Protein backbone atom coordinates (compact mmCIF):
# COMPACT_ATOMS: atom_id res chain seq x y z
CA UNK A 1 0.00 0.00 0.00
CA UNK A 2 1.11 3.57 -0.65
CA UNK A 3 1.72 5.54 2.54
CA UNK A 4 0.80 9.21 2.63
CA UNK A 5 2.45 11.52 5.14
CA UNK A 6 1.29 15.08 5.80
CA UNK A 7 3.18 17.86 7.50
CA UNK A 8 2.67 19.58 9.75
CA UNK A 9 0.12 17.63 11.78
CA UNK A 10 -1.20 20.89 13.14
CA UNK A 11 -0.78 24.51 12.23
CA UNK A 12 -1.79 27.77 13.88
CA UNK A 13 -2.41 30.77 11.66
CA UNK A 14 -4.32 34.03 11.48
CA UNK A 15 -7.01 35.27 9.13
CA UNK A 16 -5.31 36.65 6.05
CA UNK A 17 -2.21 34.46 6.35
CA UNK A 18 -0.86 32.36 3.51
CA UNK A 19 -0.42 28.75 4.58
CA UNK A 20 0.88 25.60 2.97
CA UNK A 21 0.40 21.95 3.85
CA UNK A 22 2.70 19.28 2.48
CA UNK A 23 1.85 15.71 1.54
CA UNK A 24 4.45 13.07 0.67
CA UNK A 25 3.79 9.69 -0.92
CA UNK A 26 5.91 6.61 -0.23
CA UNK A 27 6.26 6.06 -3.99
CA UNK A 28 5.49 8.03 -7.11
CA UNK A 29 1.79 8.65 -7.67
CA UNK A 30 2.22 10.89 -10.72
CA UNK A 31 -0.48 13.56 -10.27
CA UNK A 32 -3.10 11.33 -8.64
CA UNK A 33 -3.41 13.42 -5.51
CA UNK A 34 -6.60 14.85 -4.02
CA UNK A 35 -7.36 17.16 -1.08
CA UNK A 36 -10.34 17.23 1.29
CA UNK A 37 -11.45 19.59 4.04
CA UNK A 38 -13.27 18.37 7.13
CA UNK A 39 -14.91 20.40 9.86
CA UNK A 40 -15.81 18.90 13.26
CA UNK A 41 -18.83 16.61 13.11
CA UNK A 42 -19.17 16.98 9.35
CA UNK A 43 -18.36 14.85 6.33
CA UNK A 44 -15.23 15.65 4.34
CA UNK A 45 -15.59 18.13 1.51
CA UNK A 46 -13.84 17.56 -1.82
CA UNK A 47 -11.51 20.45 -2.67
CA UNK A 48 -8.89 19.56 -5.28
CA UNK A 49 -8.30 16.61 -7.60
CA UNK A 50 -5.43 15.56 -9.82
CA UNK A 51 -3.02 17.69 -7.78
CA UNK A 52 -4.22 21.11 -8.93
CA UNK A 53 -7.79 21.03 -10.33
CA UNK A 54 -10.29 22.84 -8.14
CA UNK A 55 -13.64 21.20 -7.61
CA UNK A 56 -16.54 23.37 -8.73
CA UNK A 57 -17.44 25.96 -6.13
CA UNK A 58 -14.12 25.86 -4.27
CA UNK A 59 -12.70 29.37 -3.76
CA UNK A 60 -9.69 30.30 -5.84
CA UNK A 61 -7.63 31.03 -2.71
CA UNK A 62 -7.11 27.26 -2.58
CA UNK A 63 -4.45 25.83 -4.89
CA UNK A 64 -2.50 22.63 -5.24
CA UNK A 65 0.85 21.76 -6.74
CA UNK A 66 3.41 18.99 -7.01
CA UNK A 67 4.02 15.70 -8.78
CA UNK A 68 5.61 12.35 -8.17
CA UNK A 69 5.93 12.07 -4.41
CA UNK A 70 5.71 15.64 -3.08
CA UNK A 71 2.58 17.78 -3.08
CA UNK A 72 1.39 21.02 -1.52
CA UNK A 73 -1.97 22.56 -0.67
CA UNK A 74 -1.80 26.33 -0.36
CA UNK A 75 -4.41 28.72 0.96
CA UNK A 76 -3.43 32.20 -0.19
CA UNK A 77 -5.37 34.27 2.34
CA UNK A 78 -7.01 32.40 5.19
CA UNK A 79 -10.67 33.07 5.85
CA UNK A 80 -12.50 32.20 9.09
CA UNK A 81 -14.31 29.32 7.38
CA UNK A 82 -11.00 27.70 6.36
CA UNK A 83 -10.11 26.57 9.86
CA UNK A 84 -10.56 22.82 9.62
CA UNK A 85 -8.65 19.57 9.15
CA UNK A 86 -7.22 18.85 5.71
CA UNK A 87 -6.49 15.43 4.26
CA UNK A 88 -4.55 14.43 1.18
CA UNK A 89 -5.45 11.17 -0.60
CA UNK A 90 -3.80 9.23 -3.40
CA UNK A 91 -5.93 7.79 -6.19
CA UNK A 92 -3.02 6.21 -8.06
CA UNK A 93 -3.72 2.69 -6.82
CA UNK A 94 -6.16 0.67 -4.73
CA UNK A 95 -6.34 0.76 -1.78
CA UNK A 96 -6.71 4.49 -1.92
CA UNK A 97 -4.95 5.92 1.11
CA UNK A 98 -5.17 9.16 3.06
CA UNK A 99 -2.67 11.23 4.92
CA UNK A 100 -3.14 11.47 8.67
CA UNK A 101 -4.58 14.97 8.43
CA UNK A 102 -3.43 18.52 9.19
CA UNK A 103 -5.46 20.50 11.70
CA UNK A 104 -5.48 24.20 10.87
CA UNK A 105 -6.28 26.27 13.93
CA UNK A 106 -6.80 29.94 14.61
CA UNK A 107 -3.81 31.67 16.21
CA UNK B 1 -28.18 18.26 -6.25
CA UNK B 2 -26.32 15.13 -5.23
CA UNK B 3 -27.50 13.62 -1.96
CA UNK B 4 -26.20 10.56 -0.15
CA UNK B 5 -28.01 9.48 3.00
CA UNK B 6 -26.66 6.66 5.15
CA UNK B 7 -28.75 4.60 7.54
CA UNK B 8 -28.45 1.45 9.60
CA UNK B 9 -25.82 2.49 12.11
CA UNK B 10 -26.06 1.67 15.79
CA UNK B 11 -24.57 -0.24 18.70
CA UNK B 12 -23.74 -3.90 18.13
CA UNK B 13 -21.93 -6.55 20.14
CA UNK B 14 -18.59 -7.95 18.98
CA UNK B 15 -19.04 -10.82 16.56
CA UNK B 16 -22.46 -9.68 15.43
CA UNK B 17 -23.56 -8.24 12.08
CA UNK B 18 -24.94 -4.95 10.80
CA UNK B 19 -25.95 -3.66 7.38
CA UNK B 20 -25.53 -0.06 6.31
CA UNK B 21 -27.50 1.50 3.48
CA UNK B 22 -26.80 4.62 1.45
CA UNK B 23 -29.68 6.14 -0.52
CA UNK B 24 -28.48 8.19 -3.49
CA UNK B 25 -30.25 10.92 -5.43
CA UNK B 26 -29.49 13.82 -7.72
CA UNK B 27 -27.29 11.90 -10.16
CA UNK B 28 -27.42 8.78 -12.35
CA UNK B 29 -26.48 6.29 -9.65
CA UNK B 30 -26.02 3.39 -12.08
CA UNK B 31 -23.23 5.25 -13.90
CA UNK B 32 -20.84 5.77 -10.98
CA UNK B 33 -18.64 3.67 -8.79
CA UNK B 34 -19.29 4.03 -5.08
CA UNK B 35 -17.15 3.74 -1.97
CA UNK B 36 -17.35 3.31 1.77
CA UNK B 37 -14.88 5.29 3.88
CA UNK B 38 -14.74 5.18 7.67
CA UNK B 39 -13.38 7.34 10.46
CA UNK B 40 -12.75 6.02 13.95
CA UNK B 41 -13.47 8.49 16.78
CA UNK B 42 -10.83 11.21 16.80
CA UNK B 43 -8.88 9.54 13.99
CA UNK B 44 -8.28 10.02 10.29
CA UNK B 45 -10.02 8.68 7.21
CA UNK B 46 -9.73 5.05 6.12
CA UNK B 47 -11.00 3.78 2.78
CA UNK B 48 -13.02 0.56 3.24
CA UNK B 49 -14.43 -0.70 -0.06
CA UNK B 50 -15.32 0.13 -3.65
CA UNK B 51 -17.92 -1.19 -6.06
CA UNK B 52 -17.99 -0.41 -9.76
CA UNK B 53 -20.99 1.23 -11.42
CA UNK B 54 -22.44 -2.13 -12.46
CA UNK B 55 -21.36 -4.14 -9.43
CA UNK B 56 -18.94 -6.29 -11.42
CA UNK B 57 -15.82 -5.08 -9.57
CA UNK B 58 -15.42 -4.96 -5.81
CA UNK B 59 -12.34 -4.39 -3.72
CA UNK B 60 -11.77 -4.21 0.02
CA UNK B 61 -9.27 -2.90 2.49
CA UNK B 62 -7.29 -5.70 4.11
CA UNK B 63 -8.74 -4.72 7.49
CA UNK B 64 -12.26 -5.76 6.42
CA UNK B 65 -11.63 -8.34 3.70
CA UNK B 66 -13.61 -11.53 4.28
CA UNK B 67 -15.90 -9.84 6.84
CA UNK B 68 -17.52 -6.95 4.94
CA UNK B 69 -19.42 -7.10 1.64
CA UNK B 70 -20.23 -4.11 -0.53
CA UNK B 71 -23.20 -4.31 -2.89
CA UNK B 72 -25.61 -2.07 -4.75
CA UNK B 73 -29.12 -2.11 -6.16
CA UNK B 74 -29.21 0.23 -9.14
CA UNK B 75 -32.99 -0.14 -9.42
CA UNK B 76 -33.28 1.36 -5.91
CA UNK B 77 -30.36 3.83 -6.16
CA UNK B 78 -28.97 2.29 -3.01
CA UNK B 79 -25.52 1.20 -1.84
CA UNK B 80 -25.01 -1.33 0.95
CA UNK B 81 -22.31 -2.48 3.32
CA UNK B 82 -22.89 -5.80 5.04
CA UNK B 83 -20.62 -6.01 8.07
CA UNK B 84 -20.13 -9.40 9.72
CA UNK B 85 -17.93 -10.58 12.60
CA UNK B 86 -17.68 -7.03 13.88
CA UNK B 87 -14.79 -6.06 16.13
CA UNK B 88 -14.23 -3.19 18.53
CA UNK B 89 -11.78 -1.69 16.05
CA UNK B 90 -14.58 -1.39 13.48
CA UNK B 91 -16.15 1.34 15.63
CA UNK B 92 -16.33 4.40 13.38
CA UNK B 93 -18.46 6.78 11.40
CA UNK B 94 -19.05 5.14 8.02
CA UNK B 95 -19.43 7.42 5.01
CA UNK B 96 -20.64 6.45 1.58
CA UNK B 97 -18.96 8.44 -1.16
CA UNK B 98 -19.53 8.86 -4.88
CA UNK B 99 -16.65 8.35 -7.29
CA UNK B 100 -15.69 11.31 -9.44
CA UNK B 101 -15.55 9.38 -12.74
CA UNK B 102 -18.50 8.21 -14.75
CA UNK B 103 -18.16 4.62 -15.93
CA UNK B 104 -14.58 4.07 -14.88
CA UNK B 105 -13.39 4.36 -11.27
CA UNK B 106 -11.15 7.26 -10.39
CA UNK B 107 -10.72 6.44 -6.72
CA UNK B 108 -11.65 10.03 -5.97
CA UNK B 109 -14.55 10.96 -3.72
CA UNK B 110 -16.49 14.01 -4.89
CA UNK B 111 -19.63 13.71 -2.74
CA UNK B 112 -20.04 12.24 0.73
CA UNK B 113 -22.97 11.29 2.88
CA UNK B 114 -23.41 12.63 6.40
CA UNK B 115 -22.13 9.40 7.92
CA UNK B 116 -23.53 6.59 10.06
CA UNK B 117 -22.01 5.79 13.45
CA UNK B 118 -21.30 2.15 14.15
CA UNK B 119 -20.29 1.28 17.71
CA UNK B 120 -19.07 -2.23 18.45
CA UNK B 121 -19.22 -2.84 22.16
CA UNK B 122 -20.39 -5.45 24.63
Image (tube, coloured by chain):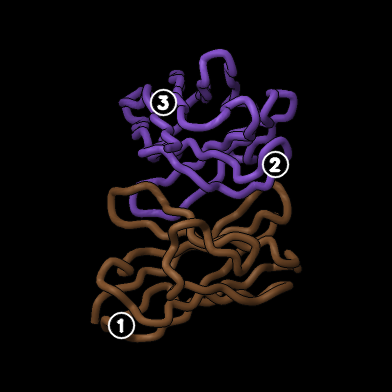
Chain A image colour: brown
Q: What is the spatial separation of the Cα atoms under label 3 and label 2, in whole angstroms?
A: 33 Å
Q: Quadrant of residue B3?
A: top left
Please, which chain is the residue tagged with disc 2 on?
Answer: B
Residue A70, compared with residue B120, is above or below; it is below
In the rendered image, residue A78, in percent from the top left (x then y), is placed at: 33, 78
In the rendered image, residue A2, in percent from the top left (x then y), is placed at: 68, 59
The reply to whether the C-beta atoms of the residues labelled 3 and 2 are less than 8 Å apart is no
Please, which chain is the residue tagged with disc 3 on?
Answer: B
Secondary structure at numbered mark 3: loop
Residue B74, compared with residue B24, is above or below; it is above
Answer left or right for B99 relative to B115.
right
Categorize mark 3 by other alpha carbons within 10 Å: few (<14), some (14-19), many (20+). some
State whether discs 3 and 1 lie on one chain. Answer: no
Q: Badge 2 is on which residue?
A: B105
Chain B image colour: purple
* Residue at 44% from the left image edge and 62% from the top image edge: A58
Instruction: Answer with mark 3 or mark 2, whichever residue precedes in sequence.
Output: 3
Please, which chain is the residue tagged with disc 1 on?
Answer: A
Viewer-nearest residue: A5 or B75: B75
Residue B122, compared with residue B112, is above or below; it is above
Q: What is the spatial separation of the Cα atoms under label 3 and label 1, in whole angstroms?
A: 43 Å
Residue B73 visible from this viewpoint: yes
* Residue at 30% from the left image edge and 82% from the top image edge: A13
Viewer-nearest residue: A52 or A39: A52
Categorize mark 1 by other alpha carbons within 10 Å: few (<14), some (14-19), many (20+). some
Residue B84 visible from this viewpoint: no
Q: Quadrant of residue B48?
A: top right
Q: What is the spatial separation of the Cα atoms under label 1 and label 2, in whole angstroms?
A: 37 Å
Q: Badge 1 is on which residue?
A: A13
Answer left or right for B113 relative to A98.
left
Amino acid sequence: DIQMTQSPSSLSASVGDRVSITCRASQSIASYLNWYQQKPGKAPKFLIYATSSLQSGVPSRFSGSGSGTDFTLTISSLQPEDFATYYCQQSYSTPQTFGQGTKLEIK
Amino acid sequence: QVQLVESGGGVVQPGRSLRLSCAASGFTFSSYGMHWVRQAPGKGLEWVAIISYDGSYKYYADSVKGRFTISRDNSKNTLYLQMNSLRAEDTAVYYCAKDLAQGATAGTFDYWGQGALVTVSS
